Image (tube, rainbow, N blue to C red):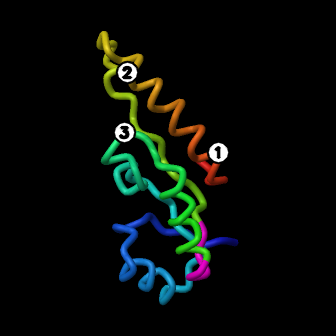
Amino acid sequence: MKIVIREGDLSDDYIGFAQQLGIDGLDINNPLNVPGVREKGFPDVDGLLRLNRRLHASGLKIFRATLPIPSRFLRGESDGDEDLDVMHKSLECFGKASIPI
């Protein structure tokens, strides 16, 4: 059995806290905590790889990450296709970084 908690803020303090709990890894539930999402709307592959290395160095792993929510698309707004483009880019980035969703 694996023990996973949701991410807090992905700071060094939080990662240290997760280590102290003895968990196996994190469930990244808030897309805004994924590197690059705040800045460009979708993950940054290099940032994901750095995060993965940081966690692995601490004995932790990412078990799942959440995609950005396509809110405009779900509401049927005219610019909703942009949300689908962001989801597509996000899927590519998570795939390149070998992070499950």
Q: Mark 2 near mark 3, Cβ–Cβ under 8 Å?
A: no
| Residue at the spot of label 1 | 95
Tell me, yes or no, whether the highlighted magenta stretch contains residue 10: no
Asked which secondary structure carries label 1, the reply is helix
Residue 87: percent from the left, percent from the top?
Answer: 48, 32
Q: Gap in Å between the C-alphas at discs 3 and 1?
A: 17 Å
Provide the residue span drawn in magenta: 57-61
Mark 3 crowdedness (10 Å alpha carbons): few <14, some 14-19, many ≥20: some
Q: Is residue 47 left or right of residue 40?
A: right
Please name the amino acid that badge 3 sits on.
Answer: Gly
Asked which secondary structure carries label 2, the reply is helix
Q: Please report the residue visible at 47 percent of the width from the left and 80 percent of the height from the top.
A: 18
| Residue at the spot of label 3 | 41
Q: Please report the residue visible at 57 percent of the width from the left and 66 percent of the height from the top.
A: 52
Tell me, yes or no, whether the highlighted magenta stretch contains residue 58: yes
Give the vertical position of 58 relative to 92 (above or below).
below
Instruction: Point out the tag, 3 or 1, that comes first from the N-terminus.
Output: 3
Closer to the camera, 63 or 45?
Answer: 45
